Amino acid sequence: MIDPVTLEVIWSRLISVVDEQAAALIHSSFTTVVREAGDLSAGVFDRGGNMIAQSVTGTPGHINTMANCVRKYIVPNHPIDSLNTGDTLITNDPWEASGHLFDLTIVTPVFYRGRGVAWFANTCHAVDIGGATMGGDAQSLYEEGLAIPLMKLFKAGDVNQELLDIIRANVRVPDQVIGDIYAQQVGNQVGARKLIEMLDEYALPDIEEVSAQILDRTERAVRAAISALPDGLYRDEIGIDGFDQPLTIACALTVDGDELRVDYAGSSPQVDRGINVVLNYTHAYTTYTLMAALAPGIPNNEGAFRPIEVRAPLGSILNCRRPAPVSARHLIGHFVSQPLLTALAEVLPRQVIANGSAGLWNTMMDGMDAAGEEFAYVFFSAGGMGAAYDRDGLSATAFPSGIMGVPVEAIETAAPLLMRRRELRPDSGGAGQFRGGLGQEMEMEIITGMNANHSCMYDRTGNAAVGLLGGEPGATGAVALSDGSNPHPKSHYVLKPGQRVTLKLPGGGGFGPPTLREPGRVLDDARQGYISLAAAQRCYGVVIDVEKMTVDFEATNARREEMDAEK
């Protein structure tokens, strides 16, 4: 048994190791998807494929799906003792890994003194994987790009050149895609080297005992957090845009002692467009959301998953059957956080947040640049987060994904796009005692002089993020062209030279009644341009003297009394 002090030191060292793994990957990457947005995960696993530690960089859709992938698919099919030094495995199977073909999971065994002792794995979003480009248009998985079954990427240190040739022949920007694959391999190699240094330093034969103690401690802590909840059944459901018609996500949480079961029975059936979600992705965002609400200070590893069971009916939008199209699965999968948190609001009002914009707004452009070379580029944007019981929601911030927005300078450097305008959307955050986060608005155009394909992956254009405990909903989003037309928010169209497209991202819901918001905070919002003077009075009942930019408290009190009487 490792003593507690030494275990804590080793735990900190493991975090450092996986952070170096992720840093090596990021610094070697060829794309802004990885370098700027951080759309990746990195982690270390014991011999049995149990995730022990993850890097601080990453998204649950990569990290938690990767955890299940290594334990449930990598290890049973390729036991560590069947591999050799220099071997590395790869797959992008949506049902086994992170839910769509664009994410490549690369897993490398670590050998120490002639024996397999651990695994390093990472998942990265490839900027292109062929097919009809990223988006919700496809009606079958086979239209969405190149599928790579679980196989060796490297064998005894030699790259599988035939596989790279196949990838290169199927993607639009092969140098970037292949470059990032090598960056993923580099990340795993750096992690392996640092882990071996740690084993030498602490005279450890492997990390099995370390893993057992860390995972058991995590499991006990999560079970204690669940035990603090009253036993019972908690339900909620939300409506979301869907592709051509609205969809429902329904959930039932059962707290039974120190265990928690989540069942998504009642959710909509899978559809014939690429917004379906595999169960592994549903599991990833369910467990992440529950950890964020119940045990935010506890490490996210295999021990955290043990007390939580996740179910969804086979053939539903959250557990689709192969070969359902899944390219834009995040547009649905990110929303599982919202009914979960609203259901828990009954017993944990101070540990949840109102509904937010949820799904990332992913924008993909492809075509020919001014030099006649093919380009493909994707960047991520976020609307507003929901407010909490004691603070406003964050503006233009992704939750629950954790993906960062890409700076305008990086977008314009990497792709032939001109961002004419990018700013926060006034009045888009839902009113409340604490205001929902603001969405953002951006206007852009293609500058090649040629047509480009714009694949839209946008939600909350029809269903607003609802507020919590008296809070108001946020604004819905919109997509508009300079000619006055409105492209389908989950399809693709041709953006012509001279046309401009404007994206208006949705805002988050408010928390608590708006008339309880301090007038001084409303005034500050108006001064910052977050809300209009009209909204200050209409939504919050705060009357502002326009000339002095001060609160008229007498008029405000009268207005708020009037609003309360109307309710």
Image: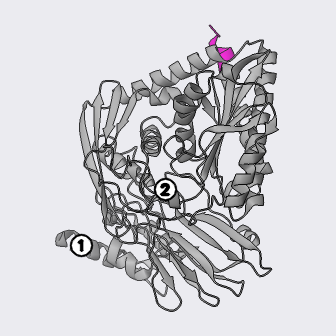
128 to 494, vertically: above or below: above
Q: Secondary structure at mark 2?
A: helix
Looking at the picture, tell me which residue is in the foreground, 42 or 507. Answer: 42
Identify residue type, mark 1: Met
Q: Is residue 65 left or right of residue 468?
A: right
What residue sits right under mark 2 in the picture? 141
366 to 214, vertically: above or below: below
Residue at (79% x, 35% y) in the render: 190
Q: Is residue 236 left or right of residue 341?
A: left
Question: Could you tell me what secondary structure mostly forms the magenta stretch?
Answer: helix
Residue 175, image x and y in percent?
78, 59
Q: Is residue 237 left or right of residue 294?
A: left
Residue 361, image x and y in percent?
52, 65
Residue 563, disc: 1
Q: Is residue 445 magenta?
A: no
Looking at the picture, tell me which residue is in the foreground, 281 or 134. Answer: 134
Q: Secondary structure at mark 1?
A: helix
Q: Which quadrant of the structure image shows residue 348?
A: top left
Q: Note whether residue 549 is visible.
A: no
Q: Is residue 7 magenta?
A: yes
Identify residue type, mark 2: Leu
State how far apart marks 2 and 1 are (Cα).
52 Å
Magenta residues (range): 1-9
Residue 223, image x and y in percent?
40, 25
For the residues carrying marks 2 and 1, which lies nearer the camera in this image? 2
